[in-house]
Image (spheres, rainbow, N blue to C red):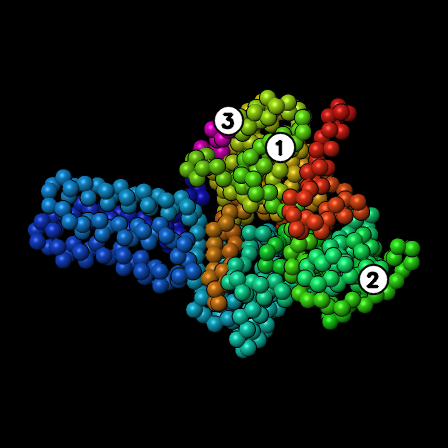
């Protein structure tokens, strides 16, 4: 309820409520005005909400139209009162219809746009919109102090490049600067959206040059080549066979562009508009793939050939690295599973599987669960029915897959966790920060059910398991029977989205403005300035050479469903664990 009440304080919510109250009054008085011959007055009064909606549209711009669809629909509803009808019943019916429609549409707007703070700086120059963006985020971004964001540094560091982009009228350069600035927040809830053409150009610039391979670091410290161009083309139509130089999938790379490979990797930042890394160790997993695009028209490397000798090679630029980098990122994350949310199946005769792609079940009941302090018995029973169905097929242990989970409502996660605990647990609280610190409001709880608290469970995560997906990872990992597993930890973000800034050139910036707090009264799950995960893995999937080559099988670029080594590891782990009785 606290978050909902906070949403009511936003300018657009205040306008919506004002139009609703006005619409109720108009629906009551309009019939009398028309009956007394003052139809022109009635028309003017019914058009005023539409005028207010048009003014709002001018202020916030076309880019924000979808965010305010219900608001603009609400502004149109008083026109119902102007529809023809002479009999008393139709007149009364119109008034009732207008009032009920206004109440329903206003409710939909408030529920579907909780905590939306929208700012339109799209009509400003690059430098002014950039400066306003940082000033606004300093006031509204809810983790500024937690992450110790230095806004003065960001302005001084990047404003000269913004001025240069403005001078050259370079839209891509401006978008590139904004992308880099948002990277410095280390928050997956802080992200940029832009037009398709600009996005592709920024992706290309940040990816760098393609030299015919990507890289991954193994747990033993070695760095090997993957997704290598061979006599069988992978990215290009024509072959570029690095095998002629002695380089193939699995070849150990020892230096890159004149630097020892570990030094080069450590200095690489994974700046990309499609992905963020709040957790440093998660970014470390991706750094080698990003390093493989660093260099000029050529890049000098050293590698260990098949005889064990260190060799030198100069690799020529083949083109743009963005396609190979995107492929490497996709394979590190495991291609997204497009089976329906909450789908389940048996992986073998003992292992069940439950896929949760997002914490969305029903918008109405999801929100009602928040009002009920986290109690969500109907969803708990839905989850239980899924598990019971698997048990009838012989399931003894369960893998819950929340990799690439895009989030939603933490209560949807809590409803599942309740099945694996017999203790009432604090889930999260809404809250705010002032000069005295953080303050909790509206505590939400996991209400124990516990019927499957002894069932062995593995929860699979990755760095793109974010927001309420991160909440799912934490709430489940707090259960004694659950093993949290992945090649990386989950994303490290959980705050409430809610703020948006529209910048010049169709660029949009999104960030969280409302706090989600832990039992201790600090931001829940999100990394602070140290970037250490707060939801650590119980079992890290080892990156051996054999595993990496399976992971980066080029065939998976052509056929994303060609195997899932992480899931295979989870199933084998559970079989070993249950067989040993641990």
Which residue does the numbered mark 2 point to in the structure image? 244
Q: Residue at 82% of width from left, 55% of height from top?
A: 251
What is the span of residues highlighted in magenta in the rendered image? 370-382
Q: Are marks 2 and 3 in contact (CB under 8 Å)?
A: no
Looking at the picture, how far across and down is residue 434, in whole percent?
51, 50
Q: Nearer the viewer, residue 409 or 571?
A: 571
Instruction: Choose the circle earlier in sequence order: 2 or 3.
Output: 2
**C-alpha span from label 3 to label 1:** 17 Å
Residue pictured at 19% horizontal, 58% vertical: 44
Q: Residue at x 27, y 57 (%)?
A: 50
Q: Earlier in the sequence, mark 3 or mark 1?
A: 1
The image quarter in which residue 158 lies: bottom right
Q: Is residue 255 above or below residue 426?
A: below
**Quarter of the image where the N terminus is located:** top left
Q: Secondary structure at mark 1?
A: strand
Residue placed under numbered mark 3 in the picture: 381
Residue 253, above or below 361:
below
Which residue position holds label 1?
353
Q: Of the two numbered discs 1 and 2 on the same chain, state the one appearing first in sequence.
A: 2
Secondary structure beneath disc 3? helix
In this picture, residue 217 sits left or right of residue 110: right
Q: How many marks?
A: 3
Q: CA distance from mark 1 to mark 2?
A: 44 Å
Q: Considering only vertical position in the picture, is 103 above or below 60?
A: above
């Amino acid at each position: 309820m606290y978050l909902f009440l906070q949403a009511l304080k936003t300018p657009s919510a205040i306008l919506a409520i004002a139009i609703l109250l006005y619409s109720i009054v108009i629906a009551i008085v309009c019939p009398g005005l028309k009956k007394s011959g003052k139809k022109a007055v009635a028309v003017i009064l019914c058009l005023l909400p539409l005028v207010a909606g048009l003014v709002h549209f001018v202020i916030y711009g076309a880019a924000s139209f979808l965010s305010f669809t219900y608001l603009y629909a609400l502004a149109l509803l008083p026109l119902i009162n102007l529809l023809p009808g002479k009999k008393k019943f139709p007149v009364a019916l119109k008034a009732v219809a207008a009032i009920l429609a206004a109440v329903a549409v206003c409710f939909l707007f408030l529920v579907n746009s909780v905590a939306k703070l929208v700012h339109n700086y799209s009509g400003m120059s690059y430098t002014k919109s950039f400066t306003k963006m940082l000033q606004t985020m300093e006031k509204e971004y809810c983790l500024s102090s937690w992450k110790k964001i230095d806004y003065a540094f960001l302005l001084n560091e990047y404003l000269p490049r913004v001025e240069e982009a403005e001078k050259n009228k370079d839209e891509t350069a401006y978008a590139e600067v904004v992308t880099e600035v948002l990277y410095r927040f280390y928050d997956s809830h802080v992200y940029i959206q832009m037009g398709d053409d600009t996005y592709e150009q920024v992706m290309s610039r940040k990816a760098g040059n393609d030299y015919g391979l990507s890289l991954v670091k193994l747990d033993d410290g070695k760095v090997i080549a993957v997704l290598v161009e061979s006599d069988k083309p992978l990215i290009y139509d024509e072959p570029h066979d690095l095998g002629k130089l002695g380089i193939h999938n699995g070849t150990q790379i020892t230096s890159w562009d004149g630097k020892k490979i570990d030094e080069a990797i450590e200095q690489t930042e994974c700046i990309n508009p499609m992905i963020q890394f709040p957790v440093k160790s998660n970014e470390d997993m991706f750094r080698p793939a990003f390093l493989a695009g660093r260099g000029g028209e050529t890049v000098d490397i050293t590698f260990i050939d098949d005889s064990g000798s260190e060799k030198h090679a100069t690799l020529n630029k083949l083109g743009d690295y963005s396609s190979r980098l995107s492929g490497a990122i996709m394979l590190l994350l495991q291609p997204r599973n497009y089976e329906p949310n909450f789908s389940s199946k048996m992986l073998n005769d003992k292992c069940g599987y439950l896929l949760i792609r997002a914490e969305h079940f029903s918008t109405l009941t999801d929100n009602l669960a928040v009002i009920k302090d986290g109690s969500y018995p109907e969803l708990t029973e839905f989850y239980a029915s899924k598990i019971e169905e698997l048990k009838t097929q012989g399931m003894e242990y369960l893998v819950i897959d929340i990799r690439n989970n895009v989030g939603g409502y933490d209560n949807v996660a809590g409803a599942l966790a309740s099945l694996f605990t017999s203790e009432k647990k604090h889930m999260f609280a809404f809250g705010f920060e002032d000069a005295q610190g953080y303050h909790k409001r509206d505590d939400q709880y996991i209400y124990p059910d516990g019927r499957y608290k002894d069932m062995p469970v593995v929860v699979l995560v990755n760095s793109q398991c974010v927001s309420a997906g991160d909440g799912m990872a934490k709430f489940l990992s707090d259960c004694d029977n659950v093993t949290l597993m992945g090649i990386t930890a989950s994303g490290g973000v959980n705050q409430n989205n809610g703020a948006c800034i529209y910048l010049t050139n169709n660029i949009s910036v999104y960030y969280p403005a409302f706090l989600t707090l832990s039992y201790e009264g600090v931001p829940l799950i999100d990394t602070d300035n140290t970037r250490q995960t707060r939801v650590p893995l119980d079992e890290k999937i080892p990156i051996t050479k054999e595993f990496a080559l399976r992971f980066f099988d080029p065939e998976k670029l052509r056929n994303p469903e060609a195997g899932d080594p992480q899931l295979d590891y989870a199933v084998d782990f559970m079989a070993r664990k249950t067989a040993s009785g641990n």
